[in-house]
Image (cartoon, rainbow, N blue to C red):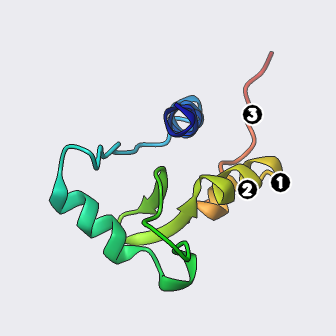
Amino acid sequence: MEIKKKQQDVVRFLEANKIEFEEVDITMSEEQRQWMYKNIPPEKKPAQGNPLPPQIFNGDRYCGDYDSFFESKESNTVFSFLGLKPRPASTAEP
């Protein structure tokens, strides 16, 4: 349940900011699960067991786990965390 909540939090943020993404369900694909495990840097893996979703990638580049995402959201650095250019401030007239 906790994992699903974290995944939904990430998805809601991406959708709200109109950031294109692909959600990958690693429970449905052993190949995707192995790819994820292989592409998480060793220093980011837990001492025991496998890393839990959500794990965030930009293409093949590992961005981080949910805790890193949450910290970047709190410090308003998500675009940098995701390896994206910050969006310019809106210039729309009221």
Q: Nearer the viewer, residue 71 or 81?
A: 71
Instruction: Give residue 72's mark.
Output: 2
In the image, 23: left or right of 40?
A: left
Asked if 65 appears above or below 45 in the picture, the reply is: above
* Image position, residue 60 (x, y; %): 35, 71
Q: Residues within 10 Å of mark 2 (few under 14, many from 20)?
A: some
Q: Nearer the viewer, residue 4 or 72?
A: 4
Q: Mark 2 or 3 closer to N-term?
A: 2
Q: Residue furthest top?
A: 94
The span from disc 2 to disc 3 (Cα, nearest Å) is 25 Å
**Kind of residue indicated by mark 2:** Ser
Give residue 32's quadrant in the image: bottom left
The span from disc 1 to disc 2 (Cα, nearest Å) is 5 Å
In the image, 74: left or right of 1?
A: right
Q: Residue at x 53, y 66 (%)?
A: 63
Whether residue 84 is visible, yes or no, is no
* Image position, residue 94 (x, y; %): 80, 15
Are the two marked residues, 1 and 2, in contact with CB atoms closer than 8 angstroms?
Answer: yes
In the image, 12: left or right of 20?
A: right
Q: Residue at x 33, y 65 (%)?
A: 36
Instruction: Give residue 64's mark.
Output: none
**Kind of residue indicated by mark 1:** Ser
**Element class at badge 2:** helix
Disc nearest the viewer among 1 and 3: 1
| Residue receiving disc 3 | 91
Q: Residue at x 56, y 40 (%)?
A: 10
Asked if 12 appears above or below 82 in the picture, the reply is: above
Are the two marked residues, 2 and 3, in contact with CB atoms closer than 8 angstroms?
Answer: no
Q: Residue furthest bottom?
A: 42
| Residue receiving disc 1 | 75
**Element class at badge 1:** loop
